[in-house]
Structure formats: structure tokens, C-alpha cells
Image (cartoon, rainbow, N blue to C red):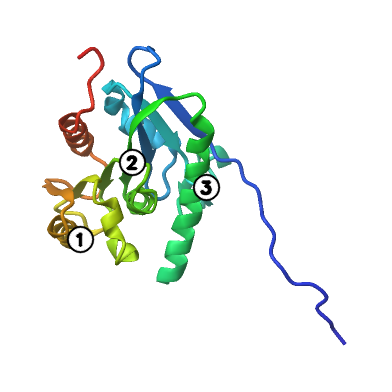
Amino acid sequence: MKDVLISGKTSFKIEVPYKLIETGEKTGQPKPLILYLHGFEQNISFLEKKAAPLTDLEAYHLFVQGPYPVYDTSRKKKVSKWGRAWYLYDGGQGQFIKSMEISSEFIQEIIDDLNHVINISRFCVVGYSMGAYLAGYFAFSRWKYVNDLVAIGGRIKIEAFEGRRDKASHLNILALHGKDDSSVFPEPQKEGIDKLKKEGFKAEFKLIDAGHHLDDVFISETEKWLIEQGYKLIGR
């Protein structure tokens, strides 16, 4: 005879690194906060290097690493160098949204903890690939806090906010996509941006002569757009 006495779930703790950088003069005046979310099987170091030109903008720059380790089958990397993921996705939309909400809560906690040491004037989320999916979800679910959204090589899941997108209508949105991107096809993202524009959003879709890789052109287009939104270069 076999009796199951207890069956349940408990939490498992894992340490996740993040880095906050301040650029420009430290005057104590409010500055923009830019949050950077990397792609699948990448980490905080990858995006910090790729997005380095954006630190020419006078702002707080917050780099956060995904919470889910992606096992290195080559066994050549230390755990700290493994790539990471932002959410667990098995094809089910319910699981997808649930997992993105958990990661969004995690990021929000980091920002809440930083609020006592930084003075934020506006808030931008920049995401690449898997990070772009999460950036879109974060911006639309935390619309009270986010002003600007840049999604690179991903898709903003606007259908997850059907009937309540109008709450986020203040968002300035830039969607950058490589025309030769075969990992995340550009057409669905363009359709989503076109729909947001019809709903009154200030949203722009820009097709880049690139593929899915985070080429420098994506970063330069992001910097150009942020300056158009009022972000300032250091010393300007």
C-alpha cells in the first residue's frame, strides 16, 4: 500500500545579477531610466557590450539578467557565463503570459528597490528578441510607469491586452526588425504596430537591412529615436 501524505509546491531561490549605471553629471536632478533586456541564451555582459553606445545618453542604465539558466551542453563555460532566458514557453499562451508576468514582477521589484537611490524623470524599456517580447509585456502591464518602448527583433503581444490597451496609449513605441529575420518574422510585428497606430498610439515600425542578430544598426536607430523623444546626449 502506498499513500501520498503531502504533495505541494515550494519556492526555489536563485541569484540574478543586475547593474545600474549613471551617465552624465550627477546633479541630483531627475534623469531617464533605460532598462535593457537581452535575448535568449544571452546574458547581462552580452547586452551591456552591445548597447554600450546608448550609454552616451544622459540617463540611468539598468541591465538585468534573465532568471532562467540555459544549460551549456559544451561544458566549457562556468555557470556564471551561461546564457539565460526570461520566461518558460511550451507553446501554450496561458503559460507564456504567466511566465512573463512572473519575470515582470521580478524586474519591478528591482526597480522598486532602486527608487530610493535614483530620481527618475521618465522610463524606457529596450528589449531584444526574447527580451523584446518581455519588454512589450512589461510596458503594457506596467503602463503607469513606462513612457517609451523599443522592441528589437521580437513581437509585442498586444492580444494579451485586448480591451485594455487604451490605458497604455501614452506609450511611445519603436519596433525595429531585420527584413531578413527568419527567427522572428517581421510581418506579425508590423501588423501589431499598424493596429496600435489605428488605436491612436504613437508607434513606429522600421524595417532594417539586417537579420535577427543584434547588429550595430539596431543600436544606432534606437539612439536616434530616443534623442527624437527628448533624451539627451552627454554634454549636449
Above or below, 105 against 110 in this view is: below
Q: Are marks 2 and 3 in contact (CB under 8 Å)?
A: no
Relative depth, front residue between 149 and 43? 149
Secondary structure of residue under mark 1: helix
Q: In terms of sequence position, does the residue under pointer 2 or pointer 3 come before the other?
A: 3
Please give left or right for residue 2 compared with residue 157 in the image.
Answer: right
**Quarter of the figure with the C terminus:** top left
The residue shown at (26%, 43%) is 150
Above or below, 48 against 71 in this view is: above
**Quarter of the figure with the N terminus:** bottom right
Relative depth, front residue between 170 and 196? 170
Q: Amino acid at mark 2?
A: Val
Q: In terms of sequence position, does the residue under pointer 3 or pointer 1 come before the other?
A: 3
Give the image location of residue 111, x and y in percent: 48, 36
The residue shown at (22%, 46%) is 173
Q: Which residue in the protein does label 3 denote?
A: 67
Above or below, 235 against 59 in this view is: above
| Distance from Cα at disc 2 to Cα at disc 3 | 17 Å
Q: Quadrant of residue 199?
A: bottom left
Whether residue 78 can be seen here: no
How crowded is the residue under tag 3: few (<14 C-alpha within 10 Å), some, or many (20+)? some
Whether residue 118 can be seen here: yes
Q: Which residue in the protein does label 2 denote?
A: 125
Above or below, 111 against 5 in this view is: above
Secondary structure of residue under mark 2: strand
Q: Nearer the viewer, mark 2 or mark 3?
A: 2
Give the image location of residue 107, x and y in percent: 48, 43
Q: Amino acid at mark 1?
A: Gly
| Distance from Cα at disc 3 to Cα at disc 1 | 28 Å
The residue shown at (57%, 42%) is 79
